[in-house]
Image (spheres, rainbow, N blue to C red):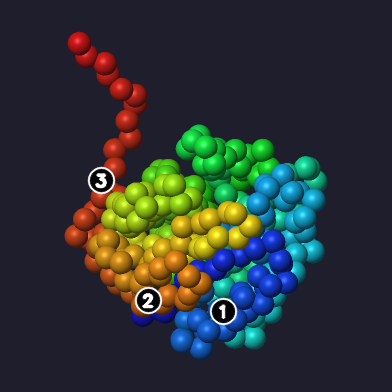
Amino acid sequence: MIRFAAIQMCSTADVAANNAEIERLVRKAAAQGAQVVSLPEAANLLLRDQFDYPATCRTEAEDGTLSLCRALAAELGIWLHTGSLLLRQDQGDRIHNRSHMIAPDGRITARYDKLHTFDVALGGGGDFIESRVVAPGERGAITCEAAGMRLGLAICYDLRFPYLFQALASAGAGVLMIPASFSPITGPLHWEPLLTARAIETGSYVVAATQCGTRDGVTTFGQSRIISPWGEALATAADDPAVILAEIDPAEVAETRRRLPVLGQTRRLDGVTHEA
């Protein structure tokens, strides 16, 4: 059994305060026996105006939150998933929305850039075009090892694209990491059903650490979850900063996929036939 923790935060425009909260909550998770700890999306910084990110964010080499996470992982002897950090491109005028997996010795063992940007027309204050500022990832699906399990990496809006998670699970991922900063417009209806569907349809655990609360007029949904391959919510958070933990059993992934061998039954379709 491997103990995973999902950290729920209310990140703000104050990077130093965010870093202090990251350190407090990561230490709390480690003290409770967590071997793999996940932060939420945009753990380092959340701004009211997305067009302020390119001038505010640091590059990966300069980012203090990433340095802090590497130091914490090494000191505490844990695997630390950064959720995602908002980082200025080395070249270009946009930013990366990027996850890192950090090993217990402080090494970065994997990077994943959010594939699907949040370009939506939810109405009113819910309209958002993330791609104006965030450069979509170009490396495709990414898995990595942590604590003896293979993890599949995703970020927030990726949750709505099942083919990504089918690819990750087919490549051996038994835990799907889905950090988020979910909209309060869609969250009440879509968040938990989508997380549960991704778990059930791939026979995987889902670890979803999220942003919560309101800062500078911007509200995020909260409700972090850890979900079993059978679709059971093993750990849940409400609307405040929190650490949630659950035991993850690699044998449960294998058993669920044996009982429901969906991944091996997938058929490729060569288009759609239109009949009268």
Query: Dot 1: what SS?
Result: helix
Q: Position of residue 44 (x, y in %)?
A: 66, 64
Would you say residue 107 is visible in this rendering? no
Q: Is residue 249 visible?
A: yes
Point 64% across, 86% down: residue: 75
Is 242 in front, or is 78? 242
Q: Which residue is mark 1?
A: 26
Going by the numbered disc 3, the residue's amino acid type is: Gln
Mark seen at residue 188 = none
- Element at label 2: strand
Contact between labelled residues 1 and 2, with CB atoms less than 8 Å apart = no
> Is 260 positioned to the left or the right of 195 in the image?
left
Q: Quadrant of residue 272?
A: top left
Counting every numbered tag in the picture gives 3
Query: What's under tag 2, amino acid-wise?
Result: Ala
Picture quarter containing residue 58?
bottom right
Crowding at dot 2, Cα within 10 Å, few <14 / some 14-19 / many 20+, comes out as: many
Choose mark 2 or mark 3, whichever is in front. Answer: 2
- The residue that label 2 is drawn on is 246
Vertical side of 164 occupied by 246: above or below? below
Q: Which percent across, then down, holds residue 221?
A: 46, 57
- First along the sequence among labels 2 and 3: 2
Q: Is residue 192 above or below residue 270?
A: below
Q: Residues within 10 Å of mark 1 (few under 14, many from 20)?
A: many
Q: Residue at x 49, y 47 (%)?
A: 157
Residue 265, which numbered label?
Answer: 3
198 w.r.t. 248: above or below:
above
> Cα distance, mark 2 to mark 1?
15 Å
Frontmost of labels 3 and 1 is: 1
| Dot 1 amino acid type | Val
Give SS at disc 3: helix
For image coordinates 29% across by 38% down, the residue present is 267
